[in-house]
Image: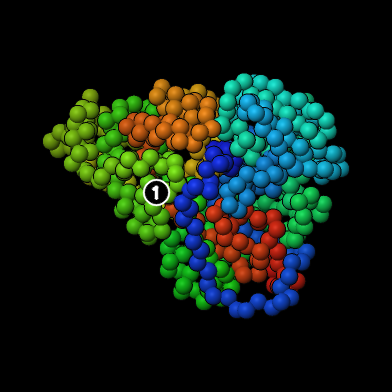
């Protein structure tokens, strides 16, 4: 979910899902940049410089297989890498793997590592590290939201130093895509370590990505330095600093003052404030594209009144999604009714968002026994008013504004809603992981693969797993299981359509909107390429031309 969003295969989803379908998807991907002057021919890649960006939340854990939030994966993804990755066109390509071969029976995959891979401490990365990493995530003691995908592997072996084979008991269609999610860990560092309680979660000893962790000041900043021996090519920018700035308004002030190179804009900042700031227009480019993420209102299904589907349906009718898109996103987003990116082949086109109808919402509440007695402001049942708290993370103005609008709409039908904003890392650790909430406004960041087993399957409700709403529907379970047993995209589509219809009927969440990503980046940062995968697909190869490095921002 990008909370910013907790990732589901964030990696998997990041959770983040069918690799053969990408070329058939209709992708909305546009960019808008402010005019730039003609660039000198000397603006060529050069080593040096610093990039400072901003995040509303601090990382919580730098061990990818047990980290469940985007802030952590943003950093950990620069340190540890998987065998495969998605390229700019959302096709699976090799990362640590040079090549791979799928057996005729589709039950095994043989990966060949790229030659001469080395960890940052000089030790070679070999297929033993791959076997170790797989066994580690399979271990009963490892609490990982991604575990279920790798429990499908029934055997794994290191054929030689560079050759790794995994075998599955049955057809598992997301198999290849899962190897774009599992970041490989160094066996010689993590062997005999309790991965759930180790200082390595904050102080890595050996990594292999484009950057090394240099310094982490909790709730202040995270600093990384370039890996001079990165196997994939030159990492041009010497230092990358992520400043933790929970307030988007403060981020914008820092951007306007030239104190950060990169920040995600709110719709108001993008559409109004940016154009009125001459410094920003002159020095920064802004981008706009629809990514693989969405925002939702989710219910803790183990708590009353959310155990009654009629109450959940009433809430869905009482929320005007278009009002949210227009009022919160200023039109920079799309209403949605299913958990897939609008415009992709996986969306069940027969499902439409429930129309906004306070009258129908009131009727459903009455059917569920919630009525308003004379002199009362709120509906009640057995003497108790219908009241709950919406929890969301501090620093995300869109979510806070969304909660406020929902609060007002539900008040009009006699529901009392409280809103609580919590700092990001505490939000994850103390509320999401402990299932201590009534309702949440959060987001999911998804991969191009359509498999969402980890979010919706009833087996994924355990500690630190992604089905933290405790949703359970046998038909959804069957659809998710059957879709994994075929490589036929049409058959997968049929099963995922069933899954979406059941979720629509049950309303474990109210799907709200998919908003556009709206980053602003200083023009000194070069090498940025807008693509179906967004602008971050090649961020390790961005650069600052030598002539512009002297204007780099000094970190405070």
The residue lying furthest to the front in this view is 104
In this image, 476 relative to 192: left or right?
left
SS label for mark 1: strand
Which residue occupies 27% across, 30% down? 310
The residue lying furthest to the left in this view is 374
Which residue occupies 77% across, 57% down? 234
Q: Can residue 296 be spotted in the picture? A: yes
Comparing 35 with 246, the one in front is: 35
Here the colouring is rainbow
**For residue 191, what is the image quadrant?**
top right
Image location (x, y in percent) of residue 32: 50, 66
Q: Which residue is label 1 attached to?
A: 513
Image location (x, y in percent) of residue 171: 58, 26
Location of the C terminus (image quadrant): bottom right
Comparing 352 with 468, the one in front is: 352
Q: Is 427 drawn above or below residue 103 in the view shown?
A: below
Comparing 128 with 460, the one in front is: 128
In this image, 56 relative to 242: left or right?
left
Which residue occupies 63% across, 50% down? 87
Comparing 541 with 98, the one in front is: 98
Which residue occupies 28% across, 32% down? 311
In this image, 11 relative to 217: left or right?
left
Image location (x, y in percent) of residue 478: 44, 24
The crowding category of the residue bearing disc 1, from other C-alpha atoms within 10 Å (few below 14, some 14 to 19, many at least 20), is many
Q: Can residue 141 be spotted in the picture? A: no
**For residue 45, what is the image quadrant?**
bottom right
- Count of numbered badges drawn on the protein: 1
């Amino acid at each position: 979910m990008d909370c910013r969003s907790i990732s589901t295969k964030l990696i998997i989803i990041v959770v983040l899902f069918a690799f053969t379908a990408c070329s058939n998807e209709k992708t909305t991907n546009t960019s808008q940049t402010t005019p730039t002057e003609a660039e000198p021919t000397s603006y060529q890649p050069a080593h040096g410089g610093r990039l400072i960006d901003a995040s509303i939340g601090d990382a919580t854990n730098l061990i990818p297989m047990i980290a469940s939030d985007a802030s952590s994966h943003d950093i950990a993804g620069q340190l540890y890498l998987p065998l495969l990755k998605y390229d700019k066109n959302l096709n699976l390509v090799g990362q640590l793997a040079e090549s791979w071969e799928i057996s005729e029976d589709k039950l095994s995959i043989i990966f060949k590592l790229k030659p001469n891979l080395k960890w940052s401490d000089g030790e070679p990365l070999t297929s033993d590290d791959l076997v170790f990493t797989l066994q580690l995530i399979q271990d009963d003691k490892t609490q990982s939201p991604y575990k279920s995908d790798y429990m499908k592997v029934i055997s794994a072996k290191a054929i030689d130093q560079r050759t790794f084979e995994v075998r599955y008991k049955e057809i598992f269609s997301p198999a290849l895509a899962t190897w774009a999610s599992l970041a490989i860990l160094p066996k010689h560092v993590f062997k005999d370590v309790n991965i759930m309680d180790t200082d390595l979660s904050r102080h890595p000893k050996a990594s292999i990505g484009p950057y090394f962790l240099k310094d982490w000041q909790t709730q202040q900043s995270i600093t990384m330095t370039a890996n001079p021996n990165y196997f994939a090519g030159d990492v041009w920018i010497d230092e990358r600093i992520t400043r933790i700035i929970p307030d988007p308004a403060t981020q914008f002030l820092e951007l306007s003052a030239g104190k950060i190179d990169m920040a995600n804009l709110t719709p108001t900042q993008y559409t109004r404030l940016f154009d009125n700031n001459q410094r920003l227009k002159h020095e920064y480019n802004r981008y706009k594209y629809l990514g693989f993420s969405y925002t939702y209102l989710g219910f803790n299904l183990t708590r009353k009144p959310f155990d009654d589907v009629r109450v959940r349906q009433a809430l869905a009718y009482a929320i005007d999604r278009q009002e949210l898109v227009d009022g919160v996103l200023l039109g920079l987003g799309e209403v949605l009714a299913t958990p897939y990116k609008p415009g992709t082949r996986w969306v069940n086109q027969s499902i439409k968002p429930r129309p906004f109808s306070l009258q129908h919402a009131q009727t459903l509440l009455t059917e569920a026994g919630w009525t308003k007695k004379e002199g009362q402001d709120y509906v009640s049942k057995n003497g108790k008013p219908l009241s709950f708290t919406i929890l969301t993370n501090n620093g995300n103005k869109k979510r806070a504004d969304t909660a406020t609008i929902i609060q007002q709409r539900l008040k009009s039908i006699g529901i009392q809603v409280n809103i609580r904003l919590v700092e990001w890392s505490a939000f994850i650790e103390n509320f999401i992981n402990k299932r201590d909430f009534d309702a949440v406004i959060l987001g999911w960041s998804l991969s191009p693969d359509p498999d969402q087993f980890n979010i919706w399957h009833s087996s994924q409700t355990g500690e630190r797993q992604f089905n933290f709403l405790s949703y359970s529907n046998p038909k959804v379970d069957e659809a998710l299981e059957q879709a994994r047993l075929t490589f036929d995209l049409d058959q997968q589509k049929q099963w995922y359509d069933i899954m979406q219809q059941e979720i629509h009927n049950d309303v474990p969440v109210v799907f709200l909107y998919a908003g556009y990503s709206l980053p602003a980046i200083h023009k000194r940062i070069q090498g940025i390429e807008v693509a179906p995968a967004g602008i971050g697909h090649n961020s390790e190869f961005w650069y600052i031309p030598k002539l512009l490095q002297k204007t780099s921002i000094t970190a405070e």
